[in-house]
Image (spheres, grey):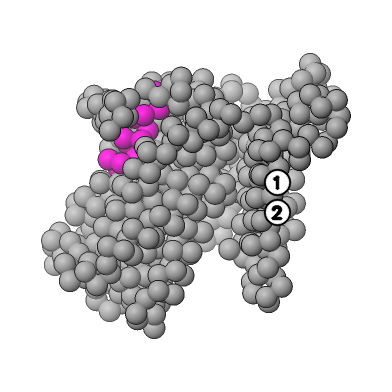
């Protein structure tokens, strides 16, 4: 192993850092397992508190939250058919079917085992590929960077579920929000409407808290405080922890090939900006069903389908971090918030990050790998208790989250205006969701907008206003062709074939 990366595991030997890893993992489990709460929300709430943390502890904690939160989304999906996160929706098809057949413990055990394998494979790929990709990224010129960011913006738009026009509108709104404040190249305010509050711009934290925390609170306000008794599965008090260990014959039935193939799919989808865990889970599940000898079992309690979707889910984590660290482009909503954690500590994601600060970043890789091991250990420790998480009174829970959200925004900026801005963005995002507009493209627009504008303007300055610079530069032309290819494969061709273009 590369010495600098092995030093990342050494950092986890520090008792304080290891406690942050465990604390983050437990927090991710809690937020991921509660319906409506996600790893995204957990890291969004943690973001302002990372100001006072040592950088290694902050990065280790968010990565363990990431891994645990993605896995835990399937827990309530299996037990009560209510996924704790969108990424657990596909898993609940077969997992809950197994639960109703009386095999809930085995379903949870297989779920954790597949997630653990996928997470470890994703972390290993991250360790092996992050540095080589960052070295290649150092060769990118300004037009190449613009076309790469444009690829990310377009991809985020076309992979969103539902209407592409609604996704494009949400992305454009995010790009518009990113232009508010001081012009990055000319020292004057833009779109501030004469308000000195808006001159400072709309910072990342109010946008994140508004789009995810406030919006989710509004969305959950109309739901019952408790799940009804008919939604709950009868507890099995006689379950033992060894009942959650997958049987050897079941693992052989699934096959090593399914685990590895699904994990590779998850890593590749994670590396695609905007892909996310839901997309990785869906594609891996579809591929497993296509190649299965018993496709008729899928949706009826298939062990293979359950393992495929969960291995891809957690393998996605390692893949999504690669474009974040090497090119400064978040792979999904969670890494978009991790982007903010890095910036808070003065670490700018991009080609130079791994070259200049590998010793600081490498504990992230180690935390992701160790957290994936904890995933399987967690089901042995807490398996009999997982079902009880879904019974927490939501009224008390969301009131607490609302308080933490607003306090967090104020603590990061000491500005009441930013608190009102988070509330306004959350209200607007809630209205968008009600009309079918996705919020993740909007967040990506807020994050990527400044880079898109900066690289566009710099490129045009170099070329003296000639836009042909974007097609004469080989790297830029390649990314533009890749953008066109993605649009064709993911939207135009499915529409022509009469299929749903949703991914």
Q: Quadrant of residue 19?
A: top left
165 on left or right of 294: right
Q: Which residues are magenta?
A: 360-371
Are discs 2 and 1 less than 8 Å apart at CB?
yes
Characterize the magenta stretch by its predominant secondary structure: helix
Question: Mark 1 sits on what residue?
Answer: 480
Mark 2 secondary-structure assignment: helix
Q: Quadrant of the C terminus?
A: bottom right
Secondary structure beneath label 1: helix
Relative depth, front residue between 298 and 121: 121
Quarter of the rendering containing residue 236: bottom left
- Residue at 76% over, 37% down: 472
Rendering coords of residue 406 (x, y %): 55, 34
Q: Considering depth in this image, is 136 or 245 the residue closer to the camera? A: 136
Q: Is residue 72 left or right of residue 351?
A: left
Which quadrant: the N terminus? Answer: top left
Cα separation between marks 2 and 1: 6 Å
Res. 356 visible in picture: yes
Image-based side of 347 in relation to 264, left or right: right
Query: At x 39% / y 80%, what residue is drawn?
Result: 295
Residue visible at 83% across and 36% down in the picture:
467
Residue nearest the observer in this picture, 432 or 4: 4
Q: Which mark is residue 206?
A: none
Q: Which mark is residue 484?
A: 2
The image position of residue 373, as x and y in percent, is 25, 46
- Residue 367 part of the magenta-drawn span: yes
The image shows residue 165 at horizontal and vertical percentages of: 75, 58
Q: Please provide percent x and percent y for residue 306.
A: 35, 67
Other residues around mark 2 within 10 Å, as few (<14) / some (14–19) / many (≥20): some
């Amino acid at each position: 192993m590369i010495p600098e990366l092995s030093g990342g595991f050494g950092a986890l030997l520090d008792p304080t850092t290891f406690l942050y890893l465990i604390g983050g993992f437990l927090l991710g489990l809690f937020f991921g397992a509660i319906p409506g709460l996600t790893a995204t929300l957990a890291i969004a709430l943690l973001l302002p508190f990372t100001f006072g943390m040592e950088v290694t502890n902050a990065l280790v904690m968010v990565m363990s939250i990431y891994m645990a939160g993605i896995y835990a989304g399937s827990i309530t999906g299996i037990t009560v058919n209510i996924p704790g996160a969108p990424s657990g929706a596909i898993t609940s098809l077969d997992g809950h079917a197994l639960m109703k057949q009386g095999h809930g413990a085995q379903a949870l055990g297989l779920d954790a085992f597949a997630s653990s394998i996928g997470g470890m494979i994703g972390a290993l790929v991250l360790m092996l590929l992050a540095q080589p990709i960052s070295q290649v990224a150092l060769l990118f010129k300004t037009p190449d960077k613009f076309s790469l960011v444009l690829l990310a913006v377009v991809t985020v738009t076309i992979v969103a579920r539902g209407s592409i026009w609604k996704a494009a509108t949400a992305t454009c709104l995010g790009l518009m929000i990113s232009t508010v404040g001081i012009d990055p190249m000319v020292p004057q305010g833009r779109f501030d409407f004469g308000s000195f509050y808006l001159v400072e711009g709309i910072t990342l934290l109010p946008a994140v808290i508004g789009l995810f925390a406030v919006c989710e609170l509004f969305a959950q306000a109309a739901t019952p405080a408790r799940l009804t008794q008919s939604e709950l599965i009868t507890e099995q008090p006689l379950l033992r922890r060894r009942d959650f260990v997958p049987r050897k014959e079941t693992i052989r039935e699934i096959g090593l090939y399914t685990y590895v193939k699904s994990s590779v799919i998850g890593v590749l989808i994670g590396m695609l900006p905007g892909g996310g865990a839901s997309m990785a889970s869906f594609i891996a599940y579809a591929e497993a069903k296509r190649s299965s000898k018993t496709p008729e079992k899928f949706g009826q309690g298939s062990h293979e389908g359950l393992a495929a979707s969960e291995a891809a889910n957690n393998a996605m984590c390692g893949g999504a971090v690669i474009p974040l660290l090497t090119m400064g482009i978040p792979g999904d909503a969670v890494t978009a918030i991790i982007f903010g954690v890095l910036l808070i500590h003065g670490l700018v994601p991009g080609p130079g990050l791994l070259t200049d600060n590998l010793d600081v970043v490498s504990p992230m890789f180690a935390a992701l790998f160790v957290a994936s091991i904890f995933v399987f250990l967690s089901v042995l420790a807490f398996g009999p208790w997982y079902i009880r998480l879904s019974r927490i009174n939501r009224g008390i829970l969301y009131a607490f989250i609302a308080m933490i959200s607003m306090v967090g925004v104020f603590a990061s900026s000491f500005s009441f205006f930013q608190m009102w801005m988070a509330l306004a963005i959350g209200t607007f995002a809630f209205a968008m969701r009600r009309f079918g507009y996705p919020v993740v493209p909007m967040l990506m627009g807020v994050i990527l907008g400044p880079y898109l504008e900066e690289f566009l303007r710099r490129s045009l300055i170099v070329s003296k206003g000639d836009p042909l610079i974007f097609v004469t530069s080989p790297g830029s032309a390649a990314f533009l062709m890749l953008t066109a290819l993605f649009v064709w494969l993911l939207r135009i061709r499915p529409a022509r074939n009469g299929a749903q273009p949703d991914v």
